[in-house]
Amino acid sequence: MACVCAGATTADATATADEPVVSRGVTIPAFYTPPARLPSANGALIRQESLPLGLSLPGLDGRPLPGTATRLMYKSTDSSGQAVAVTGAYIEPSARWEGAGPRPLVAVASGTMGQGDQCAPSLALQHPLTVNGQTTSLAYDNLAIYRLLATGAAVVVTDYVGLGATDRLHTYVNRLDEGHAVLDAVRAARALPGTSLSSGSRVGLYGYSEGGGATASAAELQPAYAPDVPLAGTYAGAPPADLTAVMKGIDGSSLAAALGWAINGFVQAYPDMRDVAAANLNDAGRKALADTSTMCVGDAILGYGFSRSSAWTTSGKSVAEIIAAEPRARAVLDEQRIGTLKPAGPVRVATGVQDDIVPHAQARRLAVDWCRKSGNVTYEAISLPNLGDKLLTNHLAPLITDQGEAISWLTDRLEGKPATSNCWTMPFQP
């Protein structure tokens, strides 16, 4: 898989359909190599196989805890309208669903994992911790997945476009690619034979950070893209709704490599962004994009933590400054704005007021935008002490402290309990 970052050509090894790929010392099973031809229907299953969970215990009734997992590949549609293969995993829980109605399904959109194929959430379910000298990856979202399974809800996890599937780069924070991948994961789970899901199973979405942006986008896109996937509730934690603001927050932080992931993805998907990147990146910038294209979060922090994008450009301006001055690049980011459409079903937006990686103000603005469109919005501003500027701590702390409330709120929606918007309590100013 070649990196398309402004002319750079650093790559993982290529593979045929029956050969594995090796990415930074991690072997990616041949399962993840898409076939040459894809089915026409969005969400159609391409293939599936058993997936051993890295953390599993034998249950008293002989069934493994927290459940039985299946690796998936399914068809979706990318931001250019082209067919794309997406991978992921479905987990049939061992716990009984005690709520009203049949067993529900939660589609989990993972937070930032990286851009290398080895960073895929489905692989992280099998290998929760990977440290091999080249890759450092921690499956931090597995805790939320296991907590959801403990409620008796089934879970489907998407790897997003290009993360896992070895035919392209992951299109990081591309709202169309990610929203489509989330909704089509639900369709794929429904199509999987032998599950306890039924036509009456309620559907919820759960995501934080990159995942919060993905679920927020899916909630907006659902009426037009997937009317067959009605949503009982959507949790969008720390959503990157305005990428211009997020790029400023990330630049110079411990997660500075995410700028490389975003640019790589947009360069791959949008010719205008490719031209802008080629005209403005210097050798250090091209190297950074090539390097980050194969990295997971851990190695990216070690390799590019606290980097300034001004060191990557020919002018010495930051990436955000260059995009602001380039109408074509600005148009690409404007297209990624979440909040221009009314979300389907009730949504819960939570954001830490100290978050300086995915800034609080732009996430709150998303809630305000949805309120203005008469969305059923529950907004939670999470107040915690400042735990360190640009260290990721202010971004990650709300993920943990709010997780129980988020799952409880979503479980209520899966049980059919109504949600009451608190839009009326918020002044309509960001």
Image: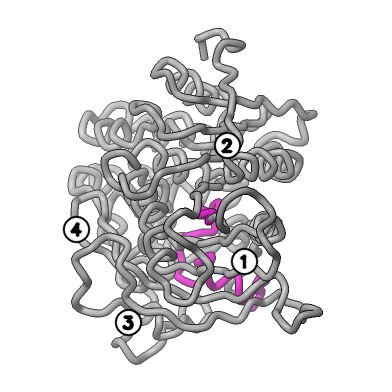
Question: Which residue position holds label 2?
Answer: 238
Residue 168 point in image, percent of width and height: 31, 66
Q: Amino acid at mark 1?
A: Ser
Asked which secondary structure carries label 1, the reply is strand
Residue 99 point in image, percent of width and height: 66, 50
Q: Amino acid at mark 3?
A: Thr
Q: Is residue 183 above or below residue 370?
A: below
First in residue order: circle 1 vs circle 3 = 3
First in residue order: circle 1 vs circle 4 = 4
- What mark, if any, has residue 82 been given in the picture? 4
First in residue order: circle 3 vs circle 4 = 3
Left or right of 146 in this view: 202: left
Real-space Cα distance between discs 2 and 4?
29 Å
Circles 3 and 4, Cβ within 8 Å, touching? The answer is no
Residue 63 point in image, percent of width and height: 70, 80
Asked which secondary structure carries label 2, the reply is loop
Task: Compare residues 8 and 14 and report the one nearer the observer.
Answer: 14
Q: Residue at x 62, y 48 (%)?
A: 100
First in residue order: circle 2 vs circle 1 = 1
- What mark, if any, has residue 196 been given in the picture? none
Question: Which residue position holds label 3?
Answer: 14
Between marks 3 and 4 in the image, the one whose residue lies nearer the viewer: 4
Would you say residue 392 is visible in this rendering?
A: no
Question: Which residue position holds label 1?
Answer: 137
* Quarter of the view holding residue 20: bottom left
